[in-house]
Image: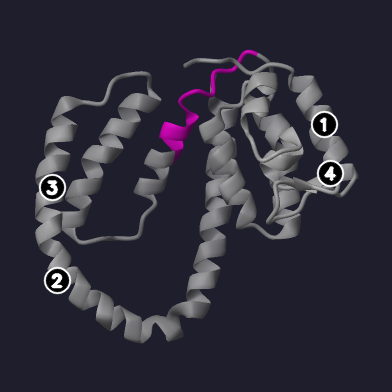
Amino acid sequence: MTTLTRNTETLRKEVAAHIEADALVRGQYWSDGKGCFIGCLTHSDDPVPAFERFGLPVAVLRIAENIFEGLSDDEGRAFFAALPDAVERDGKDLSRVHWAFLAAELRALPPVPQKVQDVIEPVIAGMDALASGGDWPLHAARAAARAADAAARAADAARAAAYAAYAAADAAAYAAADAARAARLRQRDTLLRLISEAE
């Protein structure tokens, strides 16, 4: 369903007012005049009012909420503050942004075994098709089914590797925290860029 952005100036004012009031917090939708990304846009846990008022798709809002929850307080405020500038104007179609974002996320995965990559590639192709307004390609679905069968066979080997990885997990925890933060910042930047580039 295509719904164009609207009431962008109201969005800009409300975002600024919530930032000025120091109303952004992680971990709660809306309570006692404070809330998260969705909470500040709707004063509830329901993203639909932001869709109805501003034309911001629910899928995009859910992605933004997830990113927001993984950012520091300052980074989260900056992310929320950047939303109106990315939306920019009334009349933008953001209905396919989430497909482009999800394809970008799959492309950003760390290297995986080829059998796993063979499963991922047709999914990326399908998401790219949806992001550009097309249909999920049938050949991608067939390739994904074949690759999924191969991946299932590789799962037994992956379980053995997971046990070895568990033994190394404690040493990697610190590095993982840095990597998770970097991933959240990359996701924030990707989502804002895709919103900004939408027509």
Instruction: From the image, tell me which residue sits under label 2.
Output: 157
Name which residue lies at 39% across and 51% down.
Answer: 108
Tally of numbered tags? 4
Cα–Cα gap, marks 3 and 4: 47 Å
**Along the line of sight, which residue is nearer the eye, 181 or 42?**
42
Cα–Cα gap, marks 1 and 4: 9 Å
Region of the chain picked out in magenta, as a range: 91-101
Instruction: From the image, tell me which residue sits under label 4.
Output: 19
Left or right of 50: which side holds 21?
A: right
Name which residue lies at 65% across and 31% down.
Answer: 86
Question: Compared to 157, does 15 lie above or below?
Answer: above
Q: Are marks 3 and 1 in contact (CB under 8 Å)?
A: no
Q: Residues within 10 Å of mark 1 (few under 14, many from 20)?
A: some
Colour logic: one colour
Q: Amino acid at mark 3?
A: Ala
Instruction: From the image, tell me which residue sits under label 1.
Output: 14
Q: Residues within 10 Å of mark 3 (few under 14, many from 20)?
A: many
Cα–Cα gap, marks 1 and 2: 52 Å
**Along the line of sight, which residue is nearer the eye, 31 or 173?**
31
Q: Which mark is residue 147?
A: 3
